């Protein structure tokens, strides 16, 4: 069997592994939108948690005030201090 050799050199494609400007995985606009969305979601969660906690505290305060009203006898309203000018 005879081998055939070509006079043209073989072309070898090489790829640069570290380029100075690699392609971006995400666009800048998409990252800004994602960041703003994340911040707004965090604010919404914070406000919702604060609102729920406030409602719970208001309910607890109402129960305590009701218990105090039941436990307190019907006492007269204390008189206010008179000013020195009235004496």
Image (cartoon, rainbow, N blue to C red):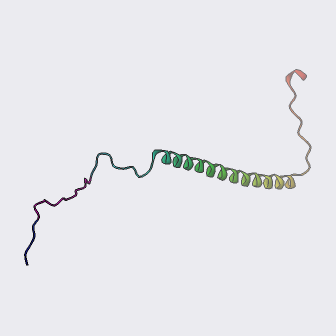
User: Does the image show residue 87?
Assistant: no
- Identify the residue shown where x is 22% and y is 56%: 14
Q: Please state if 51 lies on the left or on the right of 84 as rendered.
A: left
Question: Does the magenta run of residues contain 4?
Answer: no
- Identify the residue shown where x is 80% and y is 56%: 63
Q: Nearer the viewer, residue 68 or 27?
A: 27
- Which quarter of the figure is the C terminus placed in? top right
Residue 22 percent across, percent down from the top left:
33, 49
Count the numbered circles shown: 0
Task: Give the residues drawn in magenta, as a range.
Answer: 6-17
| 32 vs 64: above or below | above
Q: Please state if 21 lies on the left or on the right of 49 as rendered.
A: left
| 47 vs 8: above or below | above
Question: Does the magenta run of residues contain 7?
Answer: yes
Q: Nearer the viewer, residue 46 or 58?
A: 46
Query: Residue extending furthest left?
Result: 2
Residue 29 percent across, percent down from the top left:
49, 45
- Which quarter of the figure is the N terminus placed in? bottom left
> Which SS type dominates the magenta stretch?
loop
- Identify the residue shown where x is 65% and y is 49%: 47
Q: Quadrant of residue 76?
A: top right
Q: Nearer the viewer, residue 13 or 79?
A: 13
Q: Please state if 64 lies on the left or on the right of 40 as rendered.
A: right
Query: Residue extending furthest bottom?
Result: 1
- Identify the residue shown where x is 44% and y is 50%: 26
Residue 34 percent across, percent down from the top left:
52, 49
Q: Nearer the viewer, residue 23 or 45?
A: 23
Residue 40 percent across, percent down from the top left:
59, 47
Q: Please state if 54 lies on the left or on the right of 20 as rendered.
A: right
User: Does the image show residue 69?
Assistant: yes
């Amino acid at each position: 069997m005879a081998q055939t050799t070509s006079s043209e050199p073989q072309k070898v494609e090489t790829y640069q592994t570290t380029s100075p400007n690699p392609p971006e995985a995400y666009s800048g606009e998409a990252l800004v939108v994602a960041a703003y969305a994340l911040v707004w979601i965090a604010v919404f969660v914070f406000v919702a948690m604060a609102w729920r906690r406030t409602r719970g505290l208001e309910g607890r305060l109402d129960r305590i005030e009701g218990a105090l009203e039941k436990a307190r006898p019907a006492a007269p309203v204390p008189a206010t201090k008179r000013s020195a000018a009235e004496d």
